[in-house]
Amino acid sequence: SFMPAYIHLTEMAFERLDSVEARRLVAAVNQIDSTSPKAIGLGVAWSLAWGDSLQRLHADQLLKSMSGDALITAKHALNLAPDLAQATERVAGATAAQGQLSLRHRIQALDGLALSHELRGHLKQDLAIRANLTGLMDSAGFIVNWAPLIPGILRAEGYPVRIEDHPRSPPWPGDQVLWGLWLYGLAASGEGRSEDLKHTLEALRHFAPVPPKHGDTTFSLVGIERREAAGFVNALVGFEALRHGDASAATLHFSQAADSLRPLTTDVTVVDYQLGKLLLASGHAAEAERYMLTSQRWRAGMETELLVPREYYLGRIAEARGNPSVAREHYARFVRWWRYADEPPRPQWEEARQALSRLAGE
């Protein structure tokens, strides 16, 4: 059926805060099968986001008895829109509280709950939830545990994250788990574990994917994965250069990493974002905007923790390029989304608030 297409289109409408289009698409899903978990979940998500008081009350009641698939559908519809973070928290919290649901559903619920705090700048709550998530993912036997990725990215953003405040560092993933090596290396770099980083870089430089069996007609990913491994090497070397204050070396290695990773993985968002910041700092606002907007188009990737601070930098870029009306839009989103943020982002928030006031008077 067309159900999968409608699901993705509906999620995109939620992300754009297009309530009219979202309602039209929810109605289309209902026409296919109004009793399906997808239809129920999307209907509840719409009511929590834009319904009147009676619709929201009814949706809240349904959360207590919905199936795991319906709850996760509702969470997915809401959780990439910072303006809907409170609704995401309600759905994810209700899902996590249902002890009878599968471990897979509880893991997705906790991830959404953490994200709902992350998008509001509640970094301490975000990290505390992810510490719990790490344990659940370990017990579920996940080959790669993504929960420890977030502290590394937050540190790269300049927010102080203490080791004891975040999920434990990921274990060594083995030489054959490419994405696991990337996460392990990012954590090692952020925590200053130079020997572990050296070990990771060595594994990535000699990464050798298992080739397809003789006679297998499946397209071989060996060359592609080697290119991706080379991109991760440059990205990690770039983060190390950044940590040691060498902006020129960081820019060079991030540029090489972006060239390798762009067609292959959403992890390029992290690289694009850092390049945008570095280019802005060096006075190349037009080029910085290109990288920031490229990473914005990847916003459905794993690096959701960059969604909000990206608006701050896009505001600064627009100002530098002489576009005050565009700068106001970006600053306004940043100020609105993180108005109750924890202490680490507060100076950045205050700077954006002052910029917004200054531009409003021009």
Image (tube, rainbow, N blue to C red):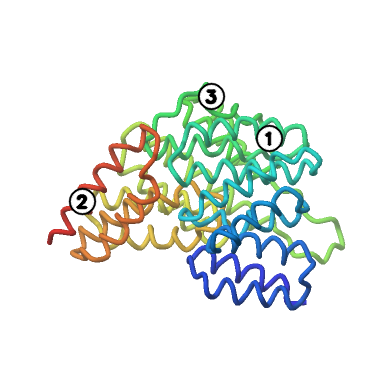
Quadrant in which residue 76 is drawn: bottom right
Q: Amino acid at mark 1?
A: Pro
Residue type at numbered disc 3: Glu
First in residue order: circle 3 vs circle 1: 1
> What residue did someone put label 3 on?
195
Name the residue at 47% across, 47% down. Answer: 119
Quarter of the figure with residue 201: top right
Q: Which mark is residue 273?
A: none
Front-lying residue, 300 or 26: 26
Residue 322: % across, % down: 18, 64
**Horizontal and vertical percent position of residue 82:** 47, 53
Mark 3 → mark 1, Cα distance in angstroms: 16 Å
On the rendered image, what quadrant is the N terminus found in? bottom right
Which quadrant: the C terminus? bottom left
Residue that numbered label 2 is attached to: 355
Q: Label 1 belongs to which residue?
A: 173
Give the residue type at disc 2. Ala
Can you tell which of label 3 and label 1 is closer to the viewer?
1
Under circle 3, the secondary element is helix
Check the image and report above or below for 94 versus 133.
Answer: below
